[in-house]
Image (cartoon, rainbow, N blue to C red):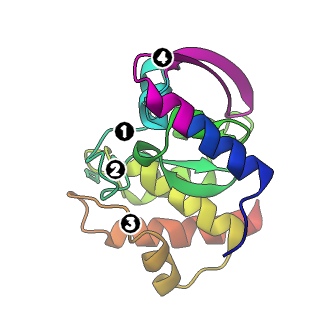
């Protein structure tokens, strides 16, 4: 097995430090949606809790908090991550993108526009997670097949839409991105 990098070792030390004393406040320096924020918070808080409770970024939704529904998805260095399974302290030194950071130059992201145009949203609770997971997919694979979209979104659950419109919206966004 490969040895941990110095950055990974640092994260492991931080995690163990914070887990030793649940009441200890941690000063976290997070880079969220391109802005640096410093926040003093409980070291045992998840990234989901830090985003919502300390930074007021409530677009990231609470769901199962067990890693099963995908509704808490954010991007860390461009990769979809379940923020309910990550300590806030583990999210230092990475670029975090939440749904509040998805707009581009004050305009909706092509994914947001496609979801709206096709009516791919019903209650909307799951949609931030879907949008960010789909963004990571299109950033790495601008022309995904229907199966690739389905596979990429398989960790995101929706109780309302039946998924077909969501898949179609990602396909539409992929097409629209080409003409931007
Ligand atoms: S709230 Fe994180 S996966 Fe469900
Ligand atoms: S739109 Fe309601 S849970 Fe997905």
Report if the beta carbon of the residue with label 1 is closer than 8 angstroms to ligand 1. Answer: yes
| Quarter of image, res 163 | bottom left
Q: Secondary structure at mark 4?
A: loop
Q: Quadrant of residue 102?
A: top right
Say which residue label 3 marks. 155
Q: Position of residue 122 (x, y in %)?
A: 27, 50
Q: Who comes first in sequence, dot 1 or dot 2?
A: 1
* Camera-side mark, 3 or 4: 4
Return the residue at label 4: 24
Find the distance from the CA under tag 3 to the CA under tag 4: 33 Å
**Ligand 1 within 8 A of label 3's CB?**
yes
At horizontal 42% and vertical 48% (from top left) the residue drawn is: 85
Viewer-nearest of labels 1 and 4?
Answer: 4
> Label 4 to label 2, Cα distance in Å?
33 Å
**Residue beneath the point at 30% across and 59% down:** 68
Q: Earlier in the sequence, mark 4 or mark 2?
A: 4
Q: Earlier in the sequence, mark 3 or mark 2?
A: 2
Name the element at disc 3. Answer: loop
Residue stretch in magenta: 16-42
Which mark, by number, is residue 61? 1
Mark 1 vs mark 2, foreground winner is: 1
Q: CA separation, marks 3 and 2?
A: 11 Å
**Mark number for residue 126?**
2
* Label 2: which secondary element: loop
Q: Please tell me the numbered disc located at residue 51.
A: none
- Provide residue 147's location: percent of width, then percent of height: 46, 86
For residue 91, side relative to residue 83 (left or right): right
**Identity of the residue drawn at 47% across and 65% down:** 169
| Residue 132 drawn at (x, y percent) | 54, 53
């Amino acid at each position: 097995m490969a040895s941990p990098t110095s950055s990974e070792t640092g994260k492991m030390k931080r995690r163990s430090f914070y887990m030793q004393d649940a009441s200890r406040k941690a000063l976290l320096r997070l880079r969220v949606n391109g802005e640096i924020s410093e926040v003093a918070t409980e070291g045992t808080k998840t990234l989901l809790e830090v985003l919502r409770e300390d930074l007021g970024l409530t677009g990231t939704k609470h769901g199962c908090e067990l890693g099963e529904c995908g509704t808490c998805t954010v991007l860390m260095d461009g990769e979809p991550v379940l923020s309910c399974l990550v300590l806030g302290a583990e999210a230092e030194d990475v670029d975090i993108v939440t749904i509040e950071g998805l707009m581009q130059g004050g305009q909706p992201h092509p994914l947001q526009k496609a979801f709206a145009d096709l009516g791919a949203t019903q209650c909307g609770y799951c949609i931030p997670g879907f949008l960010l997971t789909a963004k990571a997919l299109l950033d790495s694979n601008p022309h995904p097949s229907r199966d690739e979209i389905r596979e990429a979104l398989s960790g995101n659950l929706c109780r309302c839409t039946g998924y077909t419109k969501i898949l179609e919206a990602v396909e539409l966004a992929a097409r629209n991105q080409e003409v931007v």
